[in-house]
Amino acid sequence: LADNIGKIRSQLKQRKVNFDEAKNSINELENLISTFENNDINYDKKQYKKAISAMESGDYRTASELSEKAKSSTESSISEMKKVNLLKEQLLQQISEAKKFQNISYDPDGLDTIDKLIGDSDFEGATTKINEFFDDLNNLLELKGQVKELLGQLETKYSTSKEFVNLPSFKSDINQINDLLENSDFTTAL
């Protein structure tokens, strides 16, 4: 009888330890989940619900294992979310700097798509979209450089040729190119 009582006490102690571990793990998971909720980002709670279900049914060890697995996945998602938000901020800063320092107006359609993708926890899709915008902006910068270089060559030819040839419409064309350059229409200017 004493051996049975000792075994039961030992089992109860272990059950208490398992309960405490599961409860702590679930609490930590809930704190991580709140990060998503506070940022209005959808979070798939399947693993969380499974852990809660196991906890309520008294399977504390399984509850702990499930919540630890969900915590690891959630921490990874939070890390991805932080990376994509940083990348988005860098894009917005580069757009602002292009306007301020290069006089390039770049207001792409679809910037709100990034926020939607982030809100849907599609961090890979958001990263892809951000990189597309970076590529577009870099292409604009390259086009502007090409236009300015060709325009400089053209103006040089004009100034050396105007002594020998009457080119009144040529100056008008150069002004039109400068206007296109000012309006960030580099393709047409080129």
Image: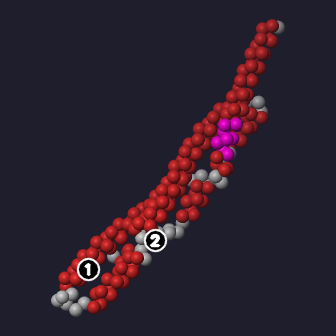
- State the residue at coordinates (19%, 85%): 161
Q: Amino acid at mark 1?
A: Glu
Going by the picture, which residue comes out furthest to the front? 100
The label on residue 155 is 1
Q: CA distance from mark 1 to mark 2?
A: 24 Å
Answer with the quarter of the image where residue 177 lies: bottom left
Category of crowding for the residue at label 1, using alpha-carbon neighbours closer than 10 angstroms: few (below 14), some (14–19), many (at least 20): some
Going by the picture, which residue comes out furthest to the right?
1
Magenta range: 27-34
Position of residue 181 relative to residue 167, above or below, is above
Q: Is residue 58 left or right of residue 100?
A: right
- Give the secondary structure at mark 1: helix
Left or right, residue 104 beside residue 2? left
Q: Secondary structure at mark 2?
A: loop
Amino acid type, label 2: Ser
Q: Which secondary structure type mostly characterizes the magenta part of the structure?
A: helix
Q: Is residue 6 visible?
A: yes
Q: What residue is shown at x 29% (from left), y 76% (from top)? A: 151
Where does label 2 land, which residue? 105
Residue occupying image coordinates x 74% and y 33%: 55
Q: Is residue 128 visible?
A: no
Q: Residues within 10 Å of mark 2 (few under 14, many from 20)?
A: some
Q: Is residue 29 above or below residue 92?
A: above
